[in-house]
Amino acid sequence: MFSAQQYVKATSLQQALELNQKRSSAILGGGCWMRLGKKNYATLIDLSGLGLDTIEETPEEIVLGAMVTLRQLETSPVLAAAFGPLFARMTEHIVGVQFRNCATLGGSVVSRFGFSDIITGLLALDCEVELVQKGRVSLADYVQMPYDRDVLARVILKKNGRRAWYESFRNTETDLPVLNCAVSCLNGSARVVVGARPARAVMQEFGQMPSEQRLQEMLDKTEFGSNMRAGAEYRRQLAGVLCRRAIEQVKGDAECR
Amino acid sequence: MQITVTLNGRRCTDEVAPDMTLYSYLRQKGCYSVKCGCETSSCGLCTVHFDGKPVLSCSMLAVRADGHSVTTLEGVEQEALEFGKFLADEGGEQCGFCSPGFIMNVLAMVKELPDPTDEQIKHYLAGNLCRCTGYQSHLRAIKKYLAAKQKEAVR
């Protein structure tokens, strides 16, 4: 468990950003991952008083506050209407309902964990993050950026009719994924995302839904690693199987044939 | 820091450290049903209801509960007893260490899913580990409990 000297419930994003400039500060998400560390924080910054726990829909976008929980993503009718079962599939195996009622979207996105189900799923969509200092940045760029002291306020999804499917494999229910992947399509072109390699997710765009050969070329270029959950070769095999399953699902969608 | 929490229906105002977990706070308030089993945010033993939703009290800070309502097993004695009978009848209880968290999650599930399928039950309760009596006895107990509740509702 971590320790903290001070707790501040931020009254504005600007205040949160200012407080977060010190290396001894941290933004408090759900606390599920943070509690596993033993760090000593001078200041914990809580964003829970800023109304960032909502999923809002505009004609072009869906705007998700950083404090939206993983369970909200899983059960949101707005997200289900826009993206089918994508959000339910990418959240439903993350520990349990109680955990998902605590863990936040912001915490998952900022951490950019290699094993992240959330990052892999979001990368399949046209997704931006809204940072208090830097403004809007595409998620694809954000995952490449180094960790810094900026504050993530919102995640924005474009409502452009993109269809997506999510697959993951776990050694046992509620464990971290051994491998995950997401495939999406928009106006005939496709995107394949492979994560939990176990390093951070990688993605590739295709002019059309990739053939067996094109998919194999992508996976041949993709690096896979070994850890306590699985070896690199096993992950490579899994990636092929899961990507093919996801491609079949997306192809089954009338919009993507 | 001063917090005011509606704990099991009673308003409590207390001084808490900024890094105190909700779990430690609840134990301090005498809610000994709440246990910490795994220290890794994954076993579900510390489950309580936060504004009616099941959460891990081990991962949430007490300061977050300021202005909110928290319910532990001590606050739902009647319902817990009712379901506990089904659990005992199916042999779903041994040492009982994981039972309070499990029962709290079952009660949350019943509110959220009035008529769940077996798959939905398993899925909702996946975050409750331990269960030394096996998962089958729990599933039987829940199904019989739900059936009895439905019968009651029809009456």
Image (cartoon, rainbow, N blue to C red):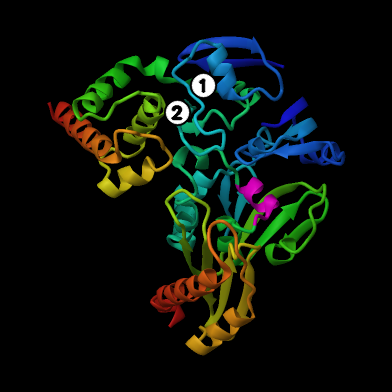
| Residue B83: x %, y % from top left | 26, 25
* Residue at mark 2: chain: B
* Spot occupied by residue A198 in the image (x, y as percentages of width and height): 61, 62
> Along the line of sight, which residue is nearer the eye, A31 or A3?
A3
Is residue A65 shown to the viewer in this render? no
Q: For numbered disc 1, what is the local secondary structure?
A: strand
**Which one is nearer the viewer's eye here, A54 or B88?**
B88
Q: Is residue A105 above or below residue A3?
A: below
Q: Is residue A107 magenta?
A: yes
Q: Which mark is residue B69?
A: 1
Residue displayed at 35% across by 36% down: B109
Q: CA distance from mark 1 to mark 2?
A: 8 Å
Q: Residue at x 42, y 51 (%)?
A: A173
Q: Residue at x 45, y 48 (%)?
A: A75
Q: Name the element at disc 2.
A: loop
- Residue B90 higher or lower than B16, as above or below: below
The image shows residue B81 at horizontal and vertical percentages of 28, 18
Q: Residues within 10 Å of mark 1 (few under 14, many from 20)?
A: some
Q: Is residue A185 magenta?
A: no
User: Which corner quadrant holds the C terminus of chain A?
Assistant: bottom left
Seen as rendered, the residue at the extreme left is B155
The residue stretch that appears in magenta: A105-113
Amino acid residing under circle 2: Gly
In the picture, measured across the screen, residue A73 lies left or right of residue B138, that is right
Q: Earlier in the sequence, mark 1 or mark 2?
A: 2
Asked if labels 2 and 1 touch by Cβ distance under 8 angstroms, the answer is: yes
Residue B52's disc number: 2
On the rendered image, what quadrant is the N terminus of chain A found in? Answer: top right
Kindly identify the amino acid type of the residue bearing the numbered disc 1: Ser
- The vertical placement of A208 against B37, above or below, is below
